[in-house]
Amino acid sequence: MMDKIKKTALISVYDKSGLTGLGKGLAGMGWEILSTGGTARLLEEAGVPVIRLADYTGSSEMLGGRVKSLHPKIHAGILALRDRKEHLDQLRQNGIGTIDLVAVNLYPFGKKSAEEELDESALLEFIDIGGVALLRAAAKNYKDVVVLSDPRDYAGVLEEIKTGKIEMKTRRRLAADAFRKTARYDGLIARFMEGEGEGEFPPVLDLSFPLKAELRYGENPHQKAALYDAAEELLGSGTTRSRQLQGKQLSYNNILDLESALTLVMRLGKKASVIIKHTNPCGVAVDDSLREAYRRARSTDPVSAFGSIVAFNTELDGETAEEIVATFVEAVVAPSYREGSREILSRKKNLRVLETGPFRQRRPWRAIRSIYGGLLVQEEDILDWKADRLKVVTGRQPSAPEWESLAFAWKVCMGAKSNAIVLARGLATTGIGAGQMSRIDAARLAVEKCAASGLEIKGSVLASDAFFPFRDVVDLAARQGVTALIQPGGSIRDQESIAAANENGLAMVFTGIRHFRH
């Protein structure tokens, strides 16, 4: 026991994880427990003696439960400084006892705000008032009051109580955690209240993300790194929402590549495979057979595919798993895994295998990049194939198969670093040039990749993430047997590119949409 004076704990939690263990542990050491509502009922059912808050304060709950703990007897008992005689005298004069531990967690406003079926009036009821006030009061007086805002801390605090003293570093850590939670909670509510119309940015950017994991290192071994998770308010599919089934711990670079792979594969139809290296696609294909999709994607650039990240948009089968383990792959991500495929993948002990579950549509998200002393923020680039913006600018219209290939290549281009050029035949890439300083170099690289892999370039289509500043890319494409091109248009020399396409009998489409990815 901490001392012979009877201690009092106030427990009122939405998340009941570990509740009975905490209640029994405190009661077993002679603590008096104040509680209310569902928390009190669960403790009583577990045989833990409880004093109902209404009986303690002499005031009934009001306004359908909106007012329960907002009472001077509660907050004075928490906030009184134990080394201030005048504080203790005032407590005695008013018949108020001290409260020495507060265990509170909050209504899940973030999670509920992501549920579209809740209207605003229902959602407002998930804004916690009393819980936030209790946490802040206890955290402010952390030297005298232990504040528990996370069930994961219950066991450790019970152990310290048994030793007779809760260390000051523990008290400060718990207080900081409580303030961090209330700050993040208020940020979620503020974003909801402000609303976020298209193109609008909040006056203050709240980046209060909980730490999910410390990583082995960053982009390079001498750099420290960590992963922070937006947690429950985002329900769409992504790397942080995925479950790792086997393999080594994910690295900083793995996570970046996995996110690039998932973002691209979720845009593709049928059975698709995306192979990513250094956040760039080095092979993409769609096929009726997932195994063939993967084989065709890998054939685009088998050299770069060594040590890559692979993503699929449908359940991974055994045949495809056999293809994967035939070469060195860093990580695989898919919605699910057919029986037997996991056993095949387990042959590669270090292979990281992630499962997303059924793909869930992502909510609008902002892309954030740090610069020294600040942040750059923009809307995520999600503007995809828009038929009403397309404009055929050449005398020849694309054929139906060319239209299908152009749409596919354009989607792949969205996932490649600028300057980017994508060559495709049917629904498979044949060459990708990305991250080059000039567009003609990106085109040459795509052609070289195609030749090095022994693929047929003749009959391919070409997609460019931005306009052609000169006709050189069109001339190069024509010499290689490319039949159709797609690009945003908008250059002052567009007519030169259009003329080059017409001279060579190529079809060319303007999208009016640029997809730079720096």
Image: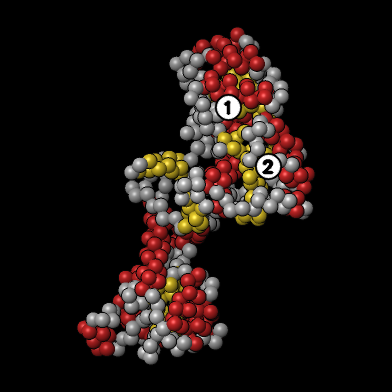
- Which mark, residue 328? 2
Which residue is denoted by mark 1 in the rendering?
A: 433
Report whether 418 appears left or right of 191: right
Cα distance in 3D space between marks 1 and 2: 23 Å
- Dot 2: within a 10 Å radius of its alpha carbon, few (fewer than 14), some, or many (20 or more) residues? some
Report whether 44 appears left or right of 174: right
- The residue mark sitting in front, 1 or 2, is 2
Report whether 341 appears left or right of 150: right
Residue at image location 67% in from the left, 24% down from the top: 452
Find residue 286 and report its horizontal and vertical position in percent. Answer: 69, 35
Q: Quadrant of the N terminus?
A: bottom left
Find residue 108 and report its horizontal and vertical position in percent. Answer: 48, 64
Q: Identify the image's colour scheme: rainbow, by chain, secondary structure or one colour.
A: secondary structure
Residue at image location 54% in from the left, 44% down from the top: 253
Picture quadrant where residue 398 is located? top right
Q: Is residue 357 visible?
A: no
Residue at image location 33% in from the left, 86% down from the top: 97
